């Protein structure tokens, strides 16, 4: 049990707000996905790792069946959501940030976790950055509520499915299983190679620094959302294409060139992206298994081009970050997450770090855009109990 900064802050805020120490503190990380974007809801492959940034939830049970939730904002201000009876939770009744923890309590109620709770949240996963801050919060809440109920958490993929239900049905974001599975199942110094259909998982060692490399994250500060239609439209297009082709999911498409002609024109690029992106994940895993990290660059570049030109989920800020990083010496770069804003990653030789960061900041400054935030991402621990 490692007590992290967010865990300490959540526990301290809990004592201030509730007046006693919490029964426990649980936390979960954000993620980046090395490659494999928009493949998860097509039953495909993903390759994420957990970030060193986490959301922590300090918690204690309540015997009146009420859910009291508060969050600590970055500026130190505390905000309490309106208390609500767990029995009264239904999709649509809780809005804003409190919908995320409430949605998890709603799902777990169906699993027999019916008691009330005090939850105080603190975290340092950048919000709106495509780094999965919402899933970090939901996973931490899930572990906290299960922990308070003394429920063993031995089936993490099942917990991931519960969290997906909260996100899809309570929050209203039609997301897949990538983010919550990464947050729950990733381990330090590895990327998680996950077959989303079978849930077969392999922890693949990933130590970029041993190769003189780093994964640089550029949070463009162009904020994104998964509830505003663009994400759902792509997902619906994929489902329509699978149904036209008579396959269970686009994962099952084998002869890409052969099937494209059978599809309405507007669906072809979606299918092309998903099929080629799955191939890129498999190729990336082969490179990692062979210790050939420095050869990942072209796969990252091809992934970005496919997301930009075929899937059409990039944004000018993402494209500029990717191009500037590459021009300054990155071996490859791509947007990560759902897109329409958020973050990009670049595979950077350590000695080019400063130059790449300078180039990205200069490109943004030239355009009068908000200064992006950059950091080096090291594969970190997944969710768990801190205290
Ligand atoms: C978002 C979603 F939450 C994930 O499920 C996944 O689809 C991702 O976008 C794109 O790969 O992060």
Image: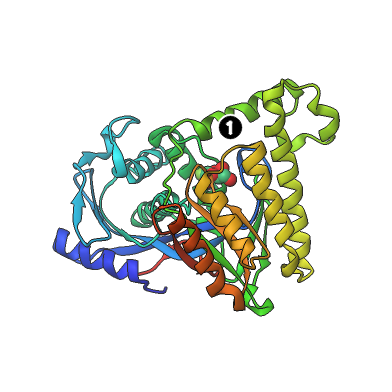
Report whether residue 336 is seen: no
* Above or below, comparing residue 280 to residue 197 in the picture: below
**Residue 89 quadrant:** top left
* Total numbered badges shown on the rendered structure: 1
**Residue 239 quadrant:** top right
Q: Residue at x 62, y 27 (%)?
A: 237
| Residue 143, position as x, y percentages in the image | 41, 55
Callout 1: SS: helix
Q: Nearer the viewer, residue 175 or 387?
A: 175
**Residue bearing the label numbered 1:** 235
Q: Residue at x 72, y 68 (%)?
A: 293
Q: Is mark 1 within 8 Å of ligand 1?
A: yes
Quadrant of image for the N terminus: bottom left
| Residue 232, position as x, y percentages in the image | 52, 31
Q: Nearer the viewer, residue 197 or 205?
A: 205
Quadrant of image for the C terminus: bottom left
């Amino acid at each position: 049990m490692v007590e992290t900064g967010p865990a300490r802050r959540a526990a301290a805020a809990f004592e201030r707000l509730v007046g006693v120490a919490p029964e426990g503190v649980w936390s979960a990380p954000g993620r980046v996905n090395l490659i494999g974007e928009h493949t998860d809801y097509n039953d495909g492959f993903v390759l994420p790792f957990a970030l060193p940034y986490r959301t922590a939830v300090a918690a204690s049970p309540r015997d009146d069946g009420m859910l009291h939730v508060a969050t600590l904002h970055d500026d130190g201000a505390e905000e309490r959501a309106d208390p609500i009876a767990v029995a009264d939770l239904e999709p649509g009744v809780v809005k804003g940030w409190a919908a995320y923890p409430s949605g998890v309590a709603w799902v777990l109620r169906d699993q027999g976790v019916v008691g009330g709770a005090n939850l105080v949240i603190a975290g340092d996963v950048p919000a709106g950055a495509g780094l999965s801050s919402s899933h970090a919060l939901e996973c931490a809440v899930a572990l906290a509520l299960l922990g308070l109920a003394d429920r063993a958490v031995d089936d993490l993929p099942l917990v991931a499915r519960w969290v997906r239900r909260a996100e899809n049905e309570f929050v209203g974001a039609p997301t897949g299983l990538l983010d919550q599975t990464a947050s729950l199942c990733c381990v330090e110094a590895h990327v998680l190679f996950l077959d989303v259909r079978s849930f077969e998982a392999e922890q693949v060692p990933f130590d970029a620094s041993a190769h003189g490399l780093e994964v640089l994250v550029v949070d463009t500060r162009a904020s994104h959302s998964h509830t505003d239609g663009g994400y759902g439209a792509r997902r619906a297009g994929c489902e329509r294409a699978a149904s036209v082709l008579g396959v269970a999911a686009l994962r099952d498409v084998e002869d890409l060139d052969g099937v494209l002609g059978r599809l309405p024109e507007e669906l072809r690029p979606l299918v092309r992206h998903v099929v080629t992106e799955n191939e890129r994940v498999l190729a990336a895993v082969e490179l990692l298994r062979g210790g050939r990290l420095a050869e990942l660059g072209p796969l990252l570049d091809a992934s970005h081009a496919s997301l930009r030109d075929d899937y059409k989920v990039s944004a000018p800020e993402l494209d500029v970050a990717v191009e500037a990083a590459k021009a300054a010496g990155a071996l490859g770069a791509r947007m990560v997450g759902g897109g329409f804003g958020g973050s990009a990653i670049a595979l950077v030789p350590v000695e080019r770090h400063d130059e790449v960061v300078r180039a990205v900041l200069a490109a943004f400054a030239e355009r009068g855009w908000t200064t992006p935030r950059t950091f080096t991402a090291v594969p970190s621990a997944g969710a768990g109990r801190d205290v």
